[in-house]
Image (cartoon, helix red, strand yellow):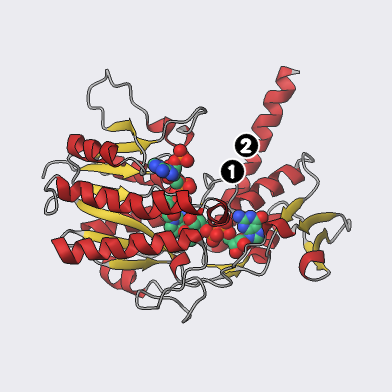
Amino acid sequence: MTAKTALITGVTGQDGAYLAELLLSKGYTVHGVKRRSSSFNTQRVDHLYQDPHESDVRFFLHFGDLTDATNLIRLVQEVQPDEIYNLAAQSHVQVSFETPEYTANSDALGTLRLLEAIRILGLESTTRFYQASTSELYGKVQETPQRETTPFYPRSPYAAAKIYAYWITVNYREAYGMHASNGILFNHESPIRGETFVTRKISRAVAAISQGLQDRLYLGNLDAKRDWGHARDYVEGMWRILQQDTPSDYVLATGEAYSVRDFVEEAFACVDRKIVWQGEGVNETGNCARTGETLVKIDPKYFRPTEVDLLLGDPSKAQAELGWRHTTTFPELVRDMVTADLDIVRKETERRNRAD
Ligand code: NDP
Ligand code: GDR
C-alpha cells in the first residue's frame, strides 16, 4: 500500500502538533496549514521541520486560513489529501464571548469551506474528513454521562459555531456520500496546552510559585467539572476514526470527571503544597496548609456569562468500534504538566542567571 497524505488545519496548535507526530511516525506525508503571524507560531512543530532540500521530506507547512475559501480550495487541490483533519478553530470558550462573529466565521463557516473544497474538486469519494467536534456541544447537559445520542445545548458562541460544524459534517456525509466523521472530544490537555486554558494556567502557576517567581494564582469558577484526558491519547482516536470503513461520530473521553478545584489541589501536591480552601464563592481563597500563605484567589473576571458546569463522557462506542481508550490517568496528566512547566521555569532561571 502506498503511504498516505494528510492535510491538517490547526497544525500549530496542541492537537495539530501531536497528530502530525503520530501520522509521520506511521509513514504519512503531512501537510499542515499555518496562519501568517507577526510573531512565531510554529514552536509546537519546529522539531518536525525538515530542510526542503533534503530527500524524503514528509512534513510541509503552507500558509492558510479557514476564513479564506480560495486558499483552502487551492491547498486541497495541490495536496490531494487522502485524509483531512480539520483542527483549526478559535478554540477558547471565553474568548468566543468577546469575538463571536470571528468565532462563527472560522469555526462554523471554515468547516463548510473545507467540505465545499472537497466537493468542488470532486474528491468526495477519495478524501476522508475529520471534524474536531467538542463536548462543549452538550453545554447545559441533558443526560450524564454524555454519549453520541445525548441532545446538544450549546452555552457559548464557540459551542454554537461548533454545532453548525458538527451538523454540516453529518449533512455532507449523508448528502454526498463523503467519508466525513465527527470526533466529539472531551477536554484533553498536555504540556503543550495553550497557556490560557485552565489546566495549563494552573500547571504554569504552580511551577512559578514553587520557584518563588509568582505569589499567587487567580482563577474563576473552581466548581466546574471536566473529563480531562491527555492529548496524545486523543489524536490516536482521531486517526482511528478515519481508518473505519464507515464514517460515523464518536465520543472520546476518559469517563471520569474532576473539578477545577481538584486540579488545583493535585497540581500543588506535585510540589508538596497542600491547599486549604477558605470562604465561599467570589471570596474563596486557597491557602497553603503549612504556612497559611494565600496561593489561590478568585477573580470574577474569569467567570463566563453562561457556564458549562459538568462534562463527563461515555466512550463506550469508541471502545467497542475503534478499540480506543485513554491510557493516561488524571494524576499522571497533572504530574506530566507540572513537571514539564517546572523544567521550563528552571531552564529559564538558569538562562537568566547565566546572562547576569
Ligand atoms: P489550539 O487552540 O491549541 O489550536 C488551534 C489551531 O487552530 C492553531 O493552530 C491555530 O493557529 C489554528 N487556527 C485558529 N484560527 C484559525 C483560522 N482562522 N485559520 C486557520 N487556523 C486557525 O486548539 P487544540 O489543539 O486544543 O484543539 C484542536 C481542535 O479541537 C480545535 O478545533 C478545538 O476547538 C477542538 N477541540 C479541542 C479540545 C481540547 O480539549 N483541546 C476538545 C474538543 C475539541 P495559531 O497557532 O496561529 O493560533
Ligand atoms: P473549556 O476549557 O472551556 O472546557 O474548553 P478551559 O480550560 O478554558 O475551562 C475549563 C473550566 O475551567 C473554568 N475556569 C477557568 N478557565 C480558564 N480558561 N481560566 C481560568 O482562570 C478559569 N477558572 C476557572 C472555566 O470556567 C471552565 O468551566 C476547552 C477548549 O479546549 C475547547 O476548545 C474545547 O472544545 C473544550 O475544552 C472541550
Which image quadrant for residue 264?
bottom right
Which type of secondary structure does the marked residue at label 1 adopt?
helix
Percent position (x, y) of residue 327?
Answer: 44, 61
Q: Where is 226 relative to 150, above or below?
A: above
Q: Does residue 119 appear in the picture of this structure?
A: yes
Q: Is residue 258 above or below residue 15?
A: below
The residue depicted at 29 percent of the width and 67 percent of the height is: 249
Q: What type is the residue that disc 2 sits on?
A: Ile
Q: Position of residue 192 (x, y in %)?
A: 52, 44
Q: Is residue 263 above or below residue 22?
A: below
Q: At 53% across and 57% down in the image, what residue appears?
A: 93
Outermost residue on the front side: it is 101
Q: Residues within 10 Å of mark 1 (few under 14, many from 20)?
A: some
Q: Quadrant of the N terminus?
A: top left
Q: Which residue is mark 2?
A: 344
Q: Position of residue 44 (x, y in %)?
A: 46, 37
List the residue tagged with mark 1. 340
Indicate left or right for 183 with 41 as reference: left
Q: Residue at x 89, y 56 (%)?
A: 291
Quadrant of the rendered image containing residue 21: top left
Q: What distance separates the C-alpha of mark 2 from that of mark 1?
A: 6 Å
Quarter of the C terminus within the rendering = top right
The three-letter amino acid code for the residue at tag 1 is Ala
Q: Report if the CB atoms under discs 2 and 1 are less than 8 Å apart.
A: yes
Residue 113 appears at what percent x and percent y? Answer: 28, 49
> Along the horizontal axis of the image, is 59 left or right of 335?
left
Residue 292 bears which disc, if any? none
